[in-house]
């Protein structure tokens, strides 16, 4: 009887602990992978070997374009970016900023420096339209998704750094 009580007590302690561990926030990369609608962006992250989303402690803020956002791009433009290591890296880093910003913080910032490694600092601008927030040309469709290394805002457009002249878009 004592053994049964001990086992039941152990189960009551370990099962909730295990469930809590399974529900802990993950890094940005794993959070996007679990969401399932960021395959194109994660492919770009992998091609660019962007470790900030996977293993860097942050904090970062990521404006993550959905697969639907990439689908709006002309195929030639997407192929041009995905087949050029420098361009794909710049595009990924253009969606990433140092610091942790919630959606409510963005209009007060007005603009923020990205991690895009171009010669001139790359800035993205924030606006509030009604009760919605925009970053560059993208609407934030889901805000404030927390990860261990920062905050993710799901957006409906792919933001393009200055390197992408109209001929390359």
Image (tube, grey):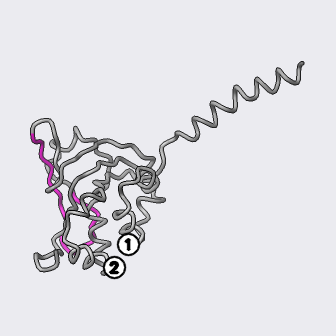
Q: Is residue 17 above or below residue 157?
A: above
Residue 146 percent coordinates (x, y): 39, 43
> Residue 86: which quarter of the image?
bottom left
Disc number at residue 85?
2
Judging depth in this view, the residue of 138 and 50 nearest the camera is: 138
Q: Which residue is mark 1?
A: 48
Is the residue 1 above or below the residue 127 in the image? above
Q: Which residues are magenta?
A: 113-129
Residue at left 58%, top 39%?
A: 21
Name the spot of residue 41 as percent of width and height, x first. Answer: 34, 63
Query: Which quadrant is home to the C terminus?
Result: bottom left
Q: Considering the image in quadrants, where does the N terminus appear?
A: top right
Answer left or right for 86 relative to 133.
right
Q: Position of residue 138 (x, y in %)?
A: 18, 54
Q: CA distance from mark 2 to mark 1?
A: 6 Å
Q: Residues within 10 Å of mark 1 (few under 14, many from 20)?
A: many
* In-image side of 55 versus 101 (left or right): right
**Residue 82 numbered mark, or none:** none
- Label 1, secondary structure: give it: helix
Residue at point 48% right, 59% down?
55
Please tell me which of labels 2 and 1 falls first in the chain: 1
- Number of numbered discs on residues: 2
Query: Is label 2 in contact with label 1 (beta carbons under 8 Å)?
Result: yes
Of helix, strand and loop, which one carries label 2? helix
Q: Please tell me in which quadrant of the rendered image residue 88 appears.
A: bottom left
Q: Is residue 103 in the magenta section?
A: no
Q: For mark 2, does the 10 Å Cα neighbourhood hold few (<14), some (14 to 19), or many (20 or more) residues?
A: some
Image quadrant of residue 91?
Answer: bottom left
Q: Which residue does the image show at 85% across and 23% down from the upper left? A: 4
Is residue 161 depicted above or below 28 in this figure? below
């Amino acid at each position: 009887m004592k053994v049964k009580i001990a086992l039941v007590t152990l189960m009551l302690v370990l099962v909730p602990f295990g469930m809590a561990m399974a529900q802990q926030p993950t890094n940005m990369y794993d959070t996007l992978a679990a969401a399932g609608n960021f395959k194109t962006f994660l492919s770009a992250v992998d091609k660019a070997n962007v470790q900030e989303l996977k293993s860097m402690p942050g904090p970062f803020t990521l404006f993550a374009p959905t697969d639907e956002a990439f689908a709006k791009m002309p195929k030639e433009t997407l192929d041009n970016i995905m087949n050029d290591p420098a361009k794909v890296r710049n595009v990924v880093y253009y969606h990433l900023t140092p610091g942790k910003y919630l959606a409510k913080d963005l209009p007060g910032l007005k603009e923020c420096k990205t991690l895009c490694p171009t010669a001139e600092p790359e800035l993205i601008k924030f606006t509030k339209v009604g009760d919605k927030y925009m970053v560059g040309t993208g609407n934030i469709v889901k805000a404030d998704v927390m990860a261990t290394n920062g905050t993710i805002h799901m957006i409906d457009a792919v933001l393009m750094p200055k390197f992408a002249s109209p001929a390359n878009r």
